[in-house]
Image (tube, rainbow, N blue to C red):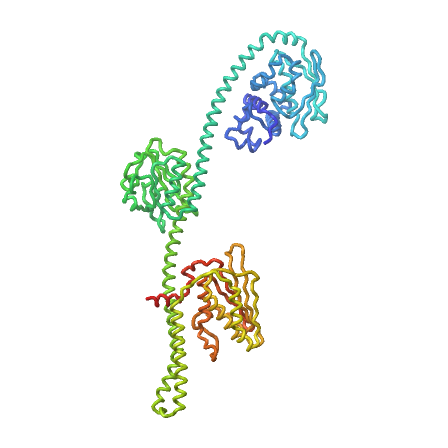
Amino acid sequence: METQASCVNIKPVLEYLKNATPIVDIAEFVRGLDPEIDALEDPIEYLTDPNNWISSIVLVKIHQRARTLLKDPEISFKIARFAIENSSLGYLQKVAIKIFFSPKNGLRHIQRINDKFSRTKRIELHDMDRNSAVIRLHWLPELVLSKDICLYNQGLYTYIPTIWVNKPLEIKETCCYFRGAPYCEYHLRWPFAYRLRHYFSRFFTSRAMLKEIITEQEKDKEIIVRKYEEVNQLNLQLSSKVTQLIAIQETGKAILSILEKDPLLTAVINILAKACSICRALIMITDDTGERLHYLHAWGFEGETPDWMKNYTVPVERRGNILTKVAREGLECHLPEVRGEQLKKERFFSRENKPIAIYACPLITDAKVIGVIAIDAPAIRGVAKETRETLKIFAPFMAIAIGNAKLYSRLKSQMEELRNSRTLLNQAEKFAFLGHLAALLAHEIKNPMTAIGTFIQMLPEKAHSSSFIEDFYAVGMEEVARINNLITQLLDLASRKESHFEPADLNPLCEKMVTLFTPQANVKRIRLQLDLDPEPCIFPMDEEKIRQVILNLLSNAVEFTPNNGTITLKTRRLIQPGQPPGFLLEVQDSGAGINPELFGRIFDPYFTTKHRSSIRQGTGLGLFIAQRNVQDHSGTIEVESRPGRGARFVIHLPEHKETPSPETVHSSAFFQKSNSQ
């Protein structure tokens, strides 16, 4: 609200209405003047304090309501006279007027006098002689004003001289701003006798004025003392609110940073104890059915919390118990004098060190009472109001803290169950893998053993046949070598080699592997292309294992790529926002591709889609070993392919090796464990 008028202009209006007939309800009269005034605790006190200021709009409304209520178009002029005759002006304004001793001196300083009352106009002293003057009131056009304000000013100018002498001035308005003129012009005239009074008043007025000032100052002293007490009380309330806000902020931090129930609740109650004065605290929560309250946490007790309290539980429907009463009704309860209450003290938490006063507050979240917090006071007059108000503010945070602690406890339990389930699942996967591997090995070994067995059965009959002996020898040795090869691979698979990491460049290794496979590629007229990063790709690696990865991928690519196809081996340094730096190793061919349905199985041991040949037996360990070696480097290997459009194997290797988590270790670790045992 912008302010242009002192409340010294409002006070006489309200005092005039108090003495009017019929009697006016002042509280109703001032209601609706301005939202800011309506929001005050005592609008009348504000409007009658000469030290306060209001807007011109409020001033206009006040005079308009008075004119309408009393049905008198000249009421504003009469109110001005009442203000002068009944000393409704503030004493500072009266002093400012009295010190000029006469109308003539007063008119010379009329703008200064006006500024003590309002900032709605500029006053021009147009002409003045010994006993007359002409003044013009230039109203500010941007303000909301009315003819009532003009009449009020005419009344003031008419009767202000009675402060010096007993007679008012004669005033005549020759033109009016509120009737279309550019200003209001008043012609003032006073008797010649004012000059004599002016002369003699110099000897007597100062002393009388000093007495008035002292009297008014005594009154103001009382007002200042009262205002000081009010300000001091407001400062105390503000300090309490600031303490509460700081405590709430610290509580929020605690809720976000502490997850365990007891440390969290202890931290929150410690913060509460700093914000207000509490002796002891007890928190009870409802069970899952909502039918019983049981102990959750206690604070402020000497030594360990008593066992009887930890085991304390009570039905919510029990009568005569403050905790159950609060839990049932969801409303706070204050017992300033415990001794006068009908409580079941033998079951109550005040059983030891009985308090004089108790205050309990519900803990509510999601519109449901989940518990109760109770505090006690060892002093008389109950738990302090400030403490109760602070606890009411803290109660929702307590409820949130308890809810979070419950969720964390439940999550922790579920995580433990999940961890146990994962352990069981890993064991089941290991046994399933072992069964699958045993079936594959049985199949791989059974065929050569069947062939050898058949030859042995026929040996008695064919012992003298040299051709049979030669065939038997060739087939038997071949099948034995095959079985031996399978067993060797199985042992290699079980005895996982320890990695030896040393800084090495990936690019030269790729060049060597391409040179190694060039003869095989030339047989099928396959183009082996290198697309290497122009900068060295150096990082800690086990060169033998990375060599085996490239070997297996290029071997598969050469075998599955048709004549006149293309195979590309690519390296790149990877720097991505938010990701650790690393390197890309990519093998892409133009072969038959892989069915997407097989993506989940191609890295399984002994899974293969190759046909047997004299070159490759298709044991299905190549991609499995490649994946295992990449994981040893904390990397990843992925495949992208479509049938008839070739396959693309993409390997990401970090620049700095990290220890792989247990979840990333393949089930083949089972063999390593079994072998060590």
Q: Residue at x 68, y 9 (%)?
A: 192
Q: Is residue 645 visible?
A: no
Residue 244 vs 106, above or below: the answer is: below
**Quarter of the image holding residue 201?**
top right
Q: Residue at x 53, y 28 (%)?
A: 43
Please tell me how many numbered marks the rendered image carries: 0
Residue 2 vs 419, above or below: the answer is: above
Quadrant of the frame with the N terminus: top right
Task: From the top left corner, tell me how far across and down residue 414 is, in percent.
Answer: 38, 56
Q: Nearer the viewer, residue 43 or 463?
A: 463
361 to the left or right of 602: left
73 to the left or right of 524: right
295 to the left or right of 90: left
Q: Nearer the viewer, residue 508 or 225?
A: 508
Quadrant of the frame with the C terminus: bottom left
Task: From the top left corner, tell me how far across and down residue 272 is, in percent.
Answer: 39, 39
Task: From the top left corner, tell me how far across and down residue 91 is, in percent.
Answer: 56, 18
184 to the left or right of 343: right
Residue 9 vs 547, above or below: the answer is: above
Residue 121 vs 358, above or below: the answer is: above
Task: From the top left corner, tell me how far across and down residue 452 is, in percent.
Answer: 37, 84
Q: Is residue 113 visible?
A: yes
Q: Residue at x 55, y 10 (%)?
A: 207
